[in-house]
Image: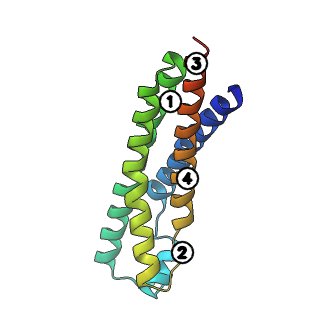
Amino acid sequence: MKTLATLSKIFYALVGILGYFFAGIYLFRSEFMPYHAIAVEKPWEEVDAGLQVLIIALMRVSGGGWLATSVAITLFFISWLKQKQTFFGISLVLVALAALIPTLYATLYVKTNSPANPPWLAATAGILILLLGLIFDLISHKKLEKQGH
């Protein structure tokens, strides 16, 4: 039971950290990602200046979305740790899925419609880790309830 509870904590924390990582990348890069260059079949320097502005703006929006999601995950995670209520774990999962599912969709869209290989595995891993965290959280809470705690 303690092992499952510990694993759920680790998995939830990993998803939040992953979100901060992607937020940092997309908020602070000065040009598009290497897989973007493969998708459009040209290096950043050959992309029209107006299109560069739009791409950077979209990257900033994506980074901002990941930052907001990660802050929400962090707040739910802290509340979940302090109050031990499943509500916070489920809220954390729903917020994270709201970001991870569209991310997976977008990366698979690029993968299937271009020669690029975007980080779809990271989104998939995030979803799996998140769901495992939820399953472990729910199982550990059920075991605690059976023991009368």
Q: Secondary structure at mark 3?
A: helix
Which mark is in front, 1 or 2? 1
Gap between marks 4 and 2 measured at Cα: 25 Å
Vertical position of residue 58 compared to residue 92: above or below: below
Circle 1 residue: 77
Q: Which of the marked residues, 1 or 2, is nearer the chain's N terminus?
A: 2
How many residues crowd around disc 1 within 10 Å: few (fewer than 14), some, or many (20 or more)?
Answer: many
* In contact (CB < 8 Å): disc 1 and disc 2: no
Q: Which residue is mark 4?
A: 128
Judging depth in this view, the residue of 70 and 105 nearest the camera is: 105
Q: Secondary structure at mark 2?
A: helix
What is the CA distance from the residue labelled 1 to the residue labelled 3?
24 Å
Disc 2 target residue: 34
Q: Secondary structure at mark 4?
A: helix
- Tell me the distance, in whole angstroms, between the alpha carbons under discs 3 and 4: 27 Å
Estimate the x, y position of residue 125 in percent, counting from the top left: 57, 56
| Residue 144 shows in the view | yes
Give the percent coordinates (x, y) of residue 126.
54, 52
The amino acid pointed to by label 3 is: Lys
The part of the image, by quadrant, that contains residue 4 is top right
Q: How far apart are the two marked residues, 4 and 1, measured between alpha carbons?
A: 17 Å
Q: Nearer the viewer, mark 3 or mark 4?
A: 3
Between disc 2 and disc 3, whose residue precedes?
A: 2
Q: Quadrant of the C terminus?
A: top right
Q: Farthest right residue?
A: 3
- Find out whether the residues at labels 2 and 3 contact each other: C-beta distance under 8 Å: no
The span from disc 2 to disc 3 (Cα, nearest Å) is 52 Å
Is label 1 in contact with label 3 (beta carbons under 8 Å)? no
Between marks 1 and 3 in the image, the one whose residue lies nearer the viewer: 3
- Reading the image, the residue beneath label 3 is 146
